[in-house]
Image (spheres, helix red, strand yellow):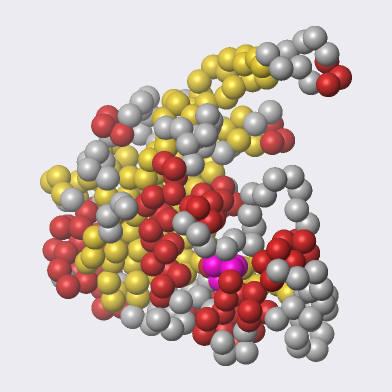
Amino acid sequence: MGTITQNSELLFLYDAKMCNPNGDPDDENRPRFDPDRERCLVSDVRLKRYIRDYLEEKGHTIYVTKAEGVVQATDRIKQVLGKDDVSGADLPALLAKLIDVRLFGATMPIKGAKKGEGEAVNLTGPVQFAWGYSLNRVQMVDSVTISSQFAAREQAGQGTFGKDYRIYYGLIGFHGVISARRAQVMLARADGNEAAATSDADIELLDEAMVNAIPLAATRSKIGQYPRLYLRVVFTDGEAFMGDPREDLTVNPDQNLRSVKELTLDLTALGGRLVRFKERVARVLVFQDPDLRTTAAGREVKAAGWLAELLGADKVKTIERT
């Protein structure tokens, strides 16, 4: 499969129940929160971490890895290339190894091959996400004090204490884009080496990670999160985008929720947006968790079947969890 030539737009919904979706280190690790709208917030960095960890566990080489201790960027490049001298590091060779850089981009401390590029190469990957936010109004769990029986070195003989912050329930939505133009720029930076640019195979791995990664990242603060809906709208060319699909979604009810089974997601307005772009939509890939109830135009629907009605069955493909 060659370098991607078609844009895609992504809608990804997952829920978080009695957990901390994205703690803010500047605020005692409380869940990131918009108090005016009562919405939980999740950074794009948090979502990319889930994807990177999943791909690494599947045997793919990752540049931004969670190694033991602090790893300098130069040291990571040495690890990837298997040599101590990276002064003449070959950018195409690096990109061919590092799937997360091909997807998301990175800054790498290697001398650019082209005049004026300096001592670091900055790459913007074709796959980017806006910050996520909850589609429903979220309530915080009153914090509880947690303790450890193990003392810090300076507190010999004493355990340590901290606060545990969580939300009751949030259905969190992300919007993402895949830019064919950015993929072509990366191909040019790699001197035309297609193994070093973002391919259709890379995007298929991204699809796989989107619907599988989060439940596998179940740490104490993250357990209780599950993917509920994923759409990747693939356009016919490298120019089309349709805008943030989260604006078209309505959660009923939108407050006092404790479970996915207590809500209904209305897709009606999203259907209107897709119909407006119908001629430029090549296909839509769909994953829907069976516990998520969806409606459109006043009737209960399944996303894949409903999209087939709107766009044609030949344009819709379902994705399953592995």
Q: How many marks?
A: 0
Q: Residue furthest top?
A: 157
**Residue 305 shows in the view:** yes
Q: Is residue 67 magenta?
A: no
Q: Is residue 41 above or below residue 65?
A: above
Residue 221 spot, x, y in % from top left? 53, 30
Secondary structure of the magenta portion, mostly?
helix
Q: Position of residue 253 (x, y in %)?
A: 30, 32
Answer with left or right where residue 37 lies relative to residue 160: left
In the shown orientation, is residue 181 left or right of residue 274?
A: right
Of residues 47 and 219, the one nearer the viewer is 219
- Residue 175 position within the rendered picture, expressed as x and y whole percent measured from the top left: 45, 56
Instruction: Tell me if residue 195 comes above or below residue 15 in the rendering.
Output: below
Residue 32 image-quadrant placement? top right
Instruction: Give x and y (percent) for residue 118.
Output: 83, 78
Q: Residue at x 56, y 87 (%)?
A: 193
Side (left or right) of 169 relative to 86: left
Q: Is residue 239 visible?
A: no
- Tell me which residue sits at (45%, 26%) in the image: 18
- Identify the magenta region: 98-102
User: Which residue is the extreme one toward the right?
Assistant: 154
- Residue at x-position 65% and y-position 36%: 24
Q: Nearer the viewer, residue 103 or 284?
A: 103
| The image quarter in which residue 254 lies | top left
| Image quarter in which the N terminus is found | bottom left
Residue under the image location 39 percent in, 67 percent down: 204
Q: Nearer the viewer, residue 3 or 240?
A: 3
